[in-house]
Image (cartoon, rainbow, N blue to C red):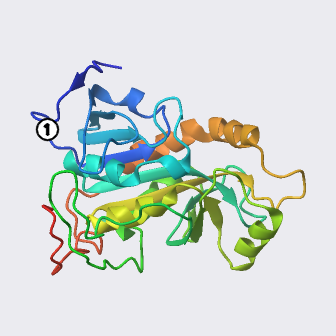
Amino acid sequence: MADTSSTPTTGLDPVEIGVLGGSGFYAFLDDVTEVTVDTPYGMPSDSVFVGELAGRRVAFLPRHGRGHHLPPHRINYRANLWALRSLGAGRILGPCAVGGLRPEYGPGTLVVPDQLVDRTTGRVQTFYDGLPRQDGRTPKVVHVSCADPYCPDGRAVALSAARASNWEAVDGGTLVVVEGPRFSTRAESRWYSAQGWSVIGMTGHPEAVLARELGLCYTSLALVTDLDAGVETGEGVTHEEVLSVFAQNVDRLRTVLFDVVKALPVARDCICSHALDGLETGLDL
Ligand SMILES: [Zn+2]
């Protein structure tokens, strides 16, 4: 890794793509600069690591912080999205570990969801709450469409990048996001499964909808690390199982992420980029 000394955000070339994920990604960027970003919503999970990959400017933010000290319900999602946007990112990639809600979605399955269900409690999930921010600005109360919460262009690139590396990713499906940090009971898990939902995670919401509220493109790459409690027949999910499967697949996932970064179109003309058209947000977007 190159120089990682902290620098102010001024003077940096704008980035195109933001990645919210586990550690192990930014070490492969060229000319990495560690940037401390403050936001009107407080501090993000960690420093942002800015560098280049195949000529694309990329900002990486470890969503759980270095050393994974932040559980999903304590992540400052607004600060994370705002920080990446403030560095110039128009596209966000959100790799995440999930549980499979169908027997055929076993460990190692990659799902590129096209729908989201929020089963969290108590997370701040909007920028448009009408409350004054730290910088004195007050956002309006507006309602942004999240009917299709993921970027169609980003999804298409993710699926083709996975297939190009012989990983037959699942095209579409519903990611249900729960509060955690505990895993589901069997009854909860069976209920999610019975709804026809595909995978279950703890960070996909409000990440995706906050990205949409800023007019950013968000693409989820959900790596199944275990079958959820209602689907498997053993003792239930353990944290060790999740970490073990994730470690086995992390190189593969990183390769796909690199290929996605290289292949994402530079120009944006999708539903996400037009999400705020005609809306008076009260924010400097
Ligand atoms: Zn988009």
Q: Which of 191 and 79 is in front in this view?
A: 79
Q: In which quarter of the image is residue 230?
A: bottom right
How many labels were placed on the picture? 1
Mark 1 surroundings: few (<14), some (14-19) or many (≥20) residues within 10 A: few
Badge 1 is on which residue?
A: 13
Q: In this view, does 18 lie above or below 228?
A: above
Quadrant (top left/top right/bottom left/bottom right) for the N terminus: top left
Q: Position of residue 209 (x, y in %)?
A: 39, 67
Q: Where is residue 148 in the image (x, y as percent from the top left)?
A: 42, 77
Q: Where is residue 14 in the image (x, y as percent from the top left)?
A: 16, 43
Ligand 1 picture quarter: bottom left
Q: Which of 119 and 160 is in front in this view?
A: 119
Q: In which quarter of the image is residue 139?
A: bottom left
On the rendered structure, is 247 left or right of 37? Answer: right
Mark 1 lies within 8 Å of ligand 1 (Cβ measured)? no
Q: Residue at x 75, y 78 (%)?
A: 194
Q: In which quarter of the image is residue 101?
A: bottom right
Q: In this view, does 77 lie above or below 120?
A: above
Q: Type of residue at label 1?
A: Asp
Q: Which residue is drawn at 34% across and 79% down?
A: 145
**Tag 1's secondary structure?**
loop
**Residue 262 makes an appearance in the image:** no
